[in-house]
Amino acid sequence: MMGSQNSETNVNDIHLSKPQREVIPGVQHTVAIASGKGGVGKSTTTVNLALALAAQGARVGLLDADIYGPNQPKMLGANQQAENESKRLLPIEAHGLKTMSIGYLIDTDTPVVWRGPMIAKMLEQLLRDTAWGELDYLLIDLPPGTGDVQLTLSKRFHVDGALIVTTPQDVALLDARKALEMFRKVDVPVLGVIENMSMHVCSQCGHEEALFGAGGGERLATDTGLDVLGRLPLLLSIREASDAGLPIVKADPDSPATHVYFEVALRLKEILEKKRKSKLKAFPDIVVG
């Protein structure tokens, strides 16, 4: 007898409405950061965006949802092990952020060799069992692709929206579009596009060159009815800061990249606030006389 198709991996079989999705207690806004493709700087964008939000006075959490390849502990310069208290994981605080990652639970050199159901269970544990406290924003750094982590998150948890990170070249845009369309299929709003590595700036002479092409993020946004929230330059200093465990927003507040991250943070806050007000208008207060 033939086995039934696994609905966990078939996005077309998902028909869950938002009220059925779990809300993380104390978290005002949950935002997924996705790319569809590895190597486009999604994790670097996520951590710097989180730091920009925090620098603007927000209470921010950061979940590293890449179970196979957690990078956030390295970028944050956080190498300690997470502790438990009353059956809750205590988030690691780094640069003013509350952070959680499987990298805080296993040795650095230990590979994660798990099948899909175990990956999904770990994501649920990291979200549910972490003592996040009161947060204005929880940013979730997703792994590449449109697999188990993405489906588990979008099926089981309330997500206010997703940001799509891409580089300008066509190959990256193909996968970014797939990630974007996946979120739309599972009824998660896509909030905008961030174009990373839009222009290489030479650290010696300041010459600018579009190494990965030009206008790709704009084409993706236009084709899908979205806005480009920011265009980030390809700078040596961004990579060096991330490798040193002090992301560019913290390492160099005057960097051109830092200014872009702050602009993206402001636009993200405006979009989410507009969504919140729209929901309030849809459900007016009922006054009983």
Image (cartoon, rainbow, N blue to C red):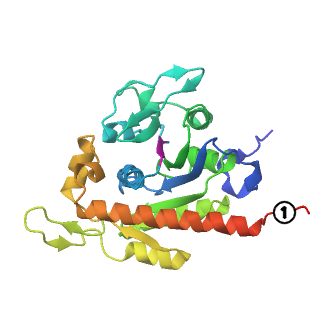
Kind of residue sitting beneath label 1: Ile
Query: Quarter of the image holding residue 200?
Result: bottom left
Is there any visible trace of residue 13 in the rendered image? yes
Q: Is residue 60 located in the magenta-colored stretch of the structure?
A: yes
Is there any visible trace of residue 16 in the rendered image? no
Query: As displayed, is residue 108 above or below residue 137?
Result: above
Residue furthest to the left in view is: 204
Quarter of the image with the C terminus in it: bottom right
Dominant secondary structure (helix, strand or loop) of the stretch shown in magenta: strand
Residue furthest to the right in view is: 289
Q: What stretch of residues is rendered in magenta?
A: 59-64
Residue 225 image offset from top left, x and y in percent: 55, 77
Query: As displayed, is residue 227 above or below residue 164?
Result: below
Residue 267 image offset from top left, x and y in percent: 46, 67
Residue at numbered disc 1: 286
Q: Residue at x 39, y 74 (%)?
A: 216
Q: Residue at x 8, y 68 (%)?
A: 205
Q: Residue at x 35, y 51 (%)?
A: 44
Secondary structure under the numbered disc 1 in the rendered image: loop
Quarter of the image with the N terminus in it: top right
Most foreground residue, 29 or 217: 29
How many marks the image carries: the answer is 1
Label 1 Cα crowd, 10 Å radius (few <14 / some 14-19 / many 20+): few
Q: Residue at x 76, y 56 (%)?
A: 17
Query: As displayed, is residue 7 above or below residue 191?
Result: above
Query: Quarter of the image holding residue 276?
Result: bottom right
Residue 14 image offset from top left, x and y in percent: 73, 54
Residue 90 image offset from top left, x and y in percent: 50, 28
Query: Quarter of the image holding residue 271?
Result: bottom right
Most foreground residue, 254 or 159: 254
Query: As displayed, is residue 125 above or below residue 45?
Result: above
Q: Is residue 255 located in the magenta-colored stretch of the structure?
A: no
